[in-house]
Amino acid sequence: MSTVKTIGESEPKALPENAYVPLKRGESYHPVIGAEMRPAELTARTILWGVLFCVVFTVASAYSTLKVGQGMEAAIPISILAIGLARMYKRRSGLLENVILIGIGGASAAVVAGAVFTLPALYMLHLDPHPVQTVFICLAGGCLGALFLIPLRRYFVREMHGQFPFPEATAITEVLVTGEKGGTQAKLLLQATAIAGLYDFFVTTFHVWKEYLNLQFLPLVRGLAERDRMVLNFDAIGFILGLGYVMGLRSAIVFCAGGVLANFVLVPLVWFLGSHMNLPVYPGTVPVAQMTAGDIYANYVRFIGVGAIATAGILGVIKSLRVIAGSFSIALRAFHPGAAPQADRTDRDIPVLAILLGIVLSALAVAIFLSRLQVSGKVLVLGLVLTLVFAFFFASVAANAIATTANNPASGMTMLTVIISAVVLVKFGLSGTTGMFFVMAIAGMVCTALCVSGQFITDLKTGYWLGSTPAAQEKVKFVGVIAAAAAAGLTIVLLAHTFQFGESAPGDLRPLLAAPQASIMKALAVGFLSRQPVTYLLFGTGAVMTIVMEMLGRSSMVFALGMYLPLSLTTPILTGGVLSHLINWRSEKTGGEQGKRIRERGVILASGLMAGGALGGVLGATLRLIPGFREDLVKTPFYAHDAISQSVSAGLFASLGLYVWFVALKKNKKEE
């Protein structure tokens, strides 16, 4: 634990001009706190506060996700809390101490996401895992996710500098830097945070106006939805507007293109081909003629998206192999005295031997855990191989997804894990309750691994921009994983004794927690362990689409994510991307210091929208935990009238965009 006195942080600097853009030939990036400095990072206060926030957010997010399917964003709210805590001490906490605090606390959302997708399914299947088993599944998955991501750090963080927008990392970095600097920029950040916080809190928590716009109060739009299953959706909240702004127009267009293909081509195509059939077409359970656009997407198009994402992830791993191999070769040369130069502080990972040892120990622990489930030797070996292979490949998928869109396709990758594991293992005699427990345990570890990988890449990019020591961030990530795994596993055990998960059982008077994600995984496990056919054609279609995108030289992962994620997310992201393009165009046209300030203010405002939206979501999720809470506690007279409610929502969302435009372009006499 370092107690080095903070050096070089008394006068905080701004981010370098090349922080968000690709580097020119021969150019290098110099972080806010240079590699030659030795600032405080691993201090007692940061670790203690980080663990405290990690446990609190883990418990709250686990209950919230199981209750309403909505978790709590952790990293951005914790970054705001860190700014306030820094001023509580006589020696004010430095930037890099706050990065460490956020890294520990942010593990909460990642581990919870992995846990709630799978562990409640075990209780739905009446398998009642031991508390040690629930904690172990979270812990093993979290450790594998962190270990497999570390070799990818140089590729995603350094080699691809400026190629990925890193929306969440951008928001956290801007919050930390702007809060540290104070002055006009800090006031601007707080203003945008407050506006988006109040806006998103009311629209997502109460019945004030419609959050989602579909324009079906218009006869033409309603006719397209009913006749052709072409449905428009738009989530009009500030968080997504800020997210699209940070992503930029280029990524936003590709992202939205995937959603347009899925919802305006594939869904209507399935409807056109199947609407005249009177029998269900697998994997659907009812005839296509009886399906809505949402049903068609869930039963068919979503699997195409899963195949596209998985293929994009595999291609991403192949692309990064050179950098991964280079990282390992540099680390291995360190075993020969004088053969390898000492890496700069800001490019120093934990030793490769420690990574390999951690992977081996984790694999042994997983093997011992799976062997206790009384399966054959072949099933045990296959289960271990599937766990390690999926965790490794999906670490790259998650990192790529978070780096581009800040959205982790955890559900799709977990579905793929459940399906492939069940199909493969059932051929070796795995079945019954043992088979279901075995498959769900693998899925739980893989899901937690990919969620932790996605969140971890955000930490590492934030640290790269600010000048953190990667090795320090990597060490404390395991502290956060341990705390979150214990809190998440035990919270689910306690909730399982008090509540029912999924559907109410006859004669059981306990209240119900919907656990929507785990319900899907349970249905898949039961279905495929019952030897149902596999939708290879749908997966393969998605894979071919990804390959076509790669042949066209486009970002296949962004396109695949757009196919998989709901259109309600991709359309407002495109709006934010357009706004970003217009403000940056105006910045270039203005030029000079004023043009630079326009660009900086735009990013700060977008970061404020993301931070405020996250805080509003956390507050709304917290209120839902209170017994007796109802969304109609605050309800406007026009809420149920779609034409008025959606028009008001559209107008207010447009007002958010105009606010960003005019404030970014506003001229101040004095800029601090």
Image (tube, rainbow, N blue to C red):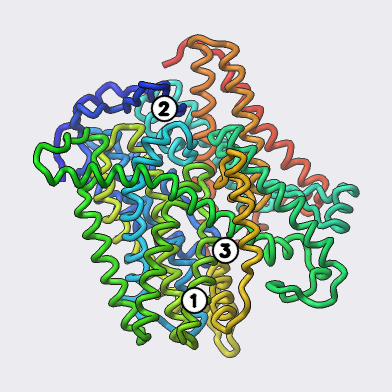
> The disc labelled 2 sits on which kind of residue?
Ala
| Outermost residue toward the left in this view | 337
Q: How far apart are marks 3 and 2 (CA)?
A: 38 Å
What number of labels is visible? 3
Residue 145 falls in which quadrant of the image?
A: bottom left
> Image point 30% across, 34% down: which residue?
95
In the rendered structure, the answer to whether residue 155 lies left or right of residue 590 reads: left
* Nearer to the camera, 571 or 401: 401
- The residue wearing badge 1 is 424
Indicate the position of residue 492 as horizontal and vertical percent values: 42, 71
Badge 3 or badge 2: first in the primary sequence: 2
**Kind of element beneath mark 3:** helix
Q: Are marks 3 and 1 in contact (CB under 8 Å)?
A: no
- The residue wearing badge 2 is 19
- The residue wearing badge 3 is 68
Residue 169 falls in which quadrant of the image?
A: top left
> Image point 60% across, 50% down: which residue?
546
Badge 1 or badge 2: first in the primary sequence: 2
**Kind of element beneath mark 2:** loop
